Image: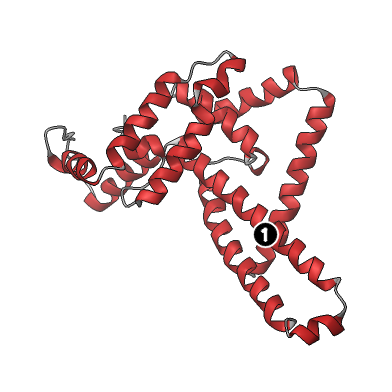
Amino acid sequence: MPVRTYYHVLGVSREATLEEITNAKNALAKVYHPDANMHNDIDTTAYMQEILEAYRTLSDPEKRRQYDLELGGGKKRVFRTFTVGDPDREKKKKEKKESDSFVTYWNAACKLNEIVNKSCHLEEQASRRASLPMKVLRKIGKTDRVEQEIEEQLSDLSLQAVQYITILKNAGIPMEYWQPETMNWVLVRWGQNQDADYHTLFAKYDAYLNQNASTTERRKYKAQHRHFHNSLKRLLSYAL
C-alpha cells in the first residue's frame, strides 16, 4: 500500500509552490468543511482536520523542510524491499502509486472547468466586439490586434486543457463525470475511505441520481454536460 503523505492529502506535487498549496487547501476546505456536508448526514471532520494539518506543515518553510527530510530518509523513512529488474522502472511504478490520489483527479477536473469557463468568457468577449460597427473598431485601432490576442489566449488555454484531460483519461474517468458537482460528491465519499476504488463511487453516484434527483434535475445535469462538452470541443479546436 502506498505511503500517504501531506502532499497526497492536498493533491499537490512535491515541487508545489506555497500558492498552489494554499489554493489546494482552500478548494478542498470548501468541499470538506463539516457544515457543507451536514445536510447529507456525512461527517467530514476527520478529513478536514487532516487537510488543515497538511497545510500547516507544508505552508511553513521550516516545517516543510523537516518533513521533506523525513520523507527522504529521516526517522519516518519507509524501507522497501529490493526487486530484481530495472530500478528506474520500479521507481516510476512506486511514484505512480503514490500519486494515485483521487484528489489529484479532482484538482484536474476543477482546473479544467476553470479553463473552459475562461474560454467561454473570451468567446463572449469576441462575440460582443464582432457586433460593434467596423467603423468604430477601426477608429480606435483595435480590430486585428485584439482579435489576435483573444485567439492566442484561447490557444494557450486549449494546451492547458489537454494536460488535465490527459490526467482524467489516464485515470479512466469518463467525461460525463468531469462536472464539479459529480467530482465533489465522489471526493467526499472517497475521503471517508481512501482505500476505496473511486470508479465504484461513480457508479454509486449514478445510483444516487436515479434515486434522489427529480426528472428536472436530471435534465439540468444533462444540459450542463452538453454545454461543457460543446465548450470544450470549441476550445480544443484552438490547439489544432
Considering only vertical position in the picture, is 230 above or below 103?
A: below
Q: Is residue 146 left or right of residue 51?
A: right
Q: Position of residue 53 (x, y in %)?
A: 32, 30
Q: Position of residue 45 (x, y in %)?
A: 44, 19
Residue at figure coordinates x 81%, y 66% from the top left: 128
Secondary structure at numbered mark 1: helix
Identify residue type, mark 1: Ser
Q: Residues within 10 Å of mark 1 (few under 14, many from 20)?
A: many
Residue at figure coordinates x 73%, y 55% from the top left: 231
Q: Position of residue 30 (x, y in %)?
A: 53, 33
Q: Which residue is mark 1?
A: 119
Q: Residue furthest left?
A: 75
Q: Residue furthest top?
A: 41
For the residue pair 132 and 178, the one nearer the viewer reads as 132
Quadrant where the image shows the N terminus: top left
Q: Is residue 229 left or right of residue 4?
A: right
Considering only vertical position in the picture, is 100 above or below 136?
A: above
Residue at figure coordinates x 77%, y 45% from the top left: 226
- Specify the quadrant of the image occupied by residue 77: top left
Residue at figure coordinates x 68%, y 61% from the top left: 235
- Specify the quadrant of the image occupied by residue 10: top left
Q: Is residue 138 left or right of residue 109?
A: right
Q: Position of residue 80 (x, y in %)?
A: 18, 35
